[in-house]
Amino acid sequence: MTDTLVSPDVLRAWRNDVFGGLIASVLTISFGLSYSVLIFTGPLASLLPYGISATFISASVIAAVIALGSSFPFAVAGPESSTAAVTAILAAALVEHIVTADAPSALLGPVLITLSSATIITGIVLCGFGVTRMGRAIRYVPYPVIGGFLGATACLIVAGAIQVITGYKLQWANLTKLANPMTLYELLAAAAVALTIYATWHRSRNPLGLPMILLGSVIAAHLVFRIAGVSVIEAQAMGWTFASPPKASLTLPWAFFSGGYPWQALPGLIGNFIAVIFVTAVSTLFNTTGLEVAAHREADIERELNATGAANILAGVLGGYAGCISISRSLLNRNSGATGRLSGLTVAAAAALMLVVDPALLAYMPRFVLGGLLLYLGLEQLHRWIVDSRKRLSLLDYLSLLAIIVIILTWGFVAGVLIGIVIGCATFALSVSRVSSIKYGFDGSEYRSSLDRSLEDQRTLAAHGREIQGLNLQSYLFFGSANRLYLHVKALLRRHPECRYLVFDFKLVTGIDSSAAHSFAQIKRIAEGHGTALVLANLHPSANRNLRASLFIDDAVKVMGELDHALEWCENEVIVRHRGLAEEEANLRDWFTKILRTADDSEELMRRCQRVEVGAGEIVVQAGDAADSMHFILDGRLGIMVPAGDGRLTRVRSLGRYTTVGEMGLVAYAPRSATIQAEIASVLYLLRADAFEDIKQNHPALSQKLLTYFVSVMAERLAFASRMIAVLRR
């Protein structure tokens, strides 16, 4: 009848699921016992049966819920080493508060209530992450912070293992106790177990390897006891095995509320609550991501968070503590042939059966066996986060990770996370600032707009295209990268003094921080001092708002929609400018030819003159300055100014286009007798004294013509002055 209802393939799949689940159950039980002794140690050692019950309630409930709800049908879940470690820290912190304030007789109720409450809160937060799709935000927590957090957790597992093995906390005050011969023998025995697990099971991951090692270690320990003539009771008294605990009844933690709860201890536990939530969330995401890679299938992150949250809520209500999906047990289950959800339910059933096992069997369990398993788990995690991470991280990130571990071990998880995030953000900012914000640079002679131009315009751009300098920007601009951009622009303008237009292409910029405004203000200031116009292209609206709010963008800054249009505008400006310069040079050449009577002399003089533009009101030379140059006024108007006696300057003469000024000082080497000021915007051509000396040495004929011209100019000005004096004498 069964064959007609269920196909052989389905039966085979069920059989494989049950087999894979049983194999994974062996690890769940082995790890569960070690987690129990990790949490319920020290003052809680006598309550270990309740710890075992809490562990396997968690293992059963979390395995069942995640088996039904996970996006991986072969998923196996339960308490993990990281979640067990922070749970142990939470329990130890509560016990310390209670022992400090009251007698330690009422530890069970508060501890179970606290662990269950932390688990329920963790579940609610995880469900919140899943519903609001905020879970992926944890992936933006800096890797050194996560690594430091889990590395510190591994250190706590190692410290907990030592306490399980010896009964002493790993503290400076206990070093002498840890150094006595019997304690050292216990530590060596645990180290031998950990080394055996590493040498045999760590690499092969044989599903039966770990339980065989643990069983073999128990048998070997009892053989040594028998050979040494030590009975089980004596081994318990010496601390080699666990004390015979009483059988624990399955009681919901909320039943202990009638006995009171130390509410005054709650504020001091907030950091530990946060640690449980953070570690569970991070472990869920890390393990889920690991399963994605190993199984070559994409996980539904929100579904995993919701399932893990629901599992923790139910486990907390029933008296368990936090857990999540396990990558090692899930992959072991999958590799054993399991493909369906029945495998996870099998693990849940096996964990539930452990609730009826007589805890008196713990009297035969050597402490160093479970302690050695914890030691292996802690050292494996330390190797992952302290040794292996060095290969993946930069030196700065790695040092940040180590610093966060030290901070957590010294001041606790909250301080470690907060300081770690600050360190992570600082190192991230430093790393990003080292990435150039400039993808590439170009100039107008090699990169132009798409506008087809005449051959004459093309020749103008080929000759003067370097007056257009462009920078293609990328990534996110903030104070670090923007400052490097400023330094680059400063060096660029120094290398290219001919630059008149500086184009910034923001197409690949993802954002601009308000702190970058200062650097852009510096860029604007140095560009104005250089006489360079700024042109912005492909500016995103948010970046536009930030730059306008900082007053960087004003009428002097050109904003264009596309780089092509920005380049076209700059090219037009260059062409117009040089077309005007060509006309200007022609006018200058005609003027000099009239003065000197030959085109060759005109070219020779032009070659030695320097073009100068001055604005209205600008001082050209100051009275009393050394006369080291003269000016040919091609366009505009200059005023000869002398003191008026009341602190003002008054004009005594005005010089227009095609006139000269300063030639007397150039010839006589006399200081300036008056101040020369531009009355309107003017274009001048400056002839320096050294250039004039060169003309006298190498072109005496040209020098003679210039002197003749200077004499004629001075004669005309003297004649004008004589006529003015004659008028004034009337």
Image (spheres, grey):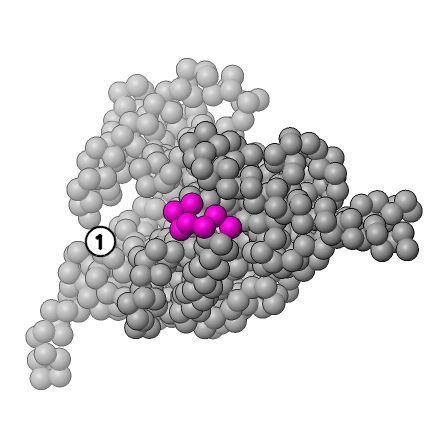
Image point (34%, 23%), residue name: 188
Side of 68 relative to 533 (left or right): left
Q: Is residue 689 left or right of residue 615?
A: left
Residue 218 falls in which quadrant of the image?
top left
Residue 34 location, x and y as percent? 38, 42
- Camera-side residue of 699 and 300: 699
Magenta run includes residue 597: yes
Residue 210 location (% of width, % of height): 24, 42
The answer to whether 198 is drawn above or below residue 15 in the figure is above
10 Å crowding of disc 1: few (<14), some (14-19), many (20+): many
- Quadrant of residue 448 within the rendered picture: bottom left
Q: Is residue 615 above or below residue 224?
A: below
Which quadrant does the C terminus fall into?
bottom right
Do we see residue 595 in this rendering?
Answer: yes
Relative horizontal placement of residue 725, taking residue 177 as reference (left or right): right
Q: Measuring 45% from the left and 63% from the top, which residue is drawn there?
A: 583
Q: Which residue is mark 1?
A: 332
* Quadrant hosting residue 336: bottom left
* Magenta span: chief secondary structure: helix
Q: Nearer the viewer, residue 250 or 91?
A: 91
Q: Which residues are magenta?
A: 595-601
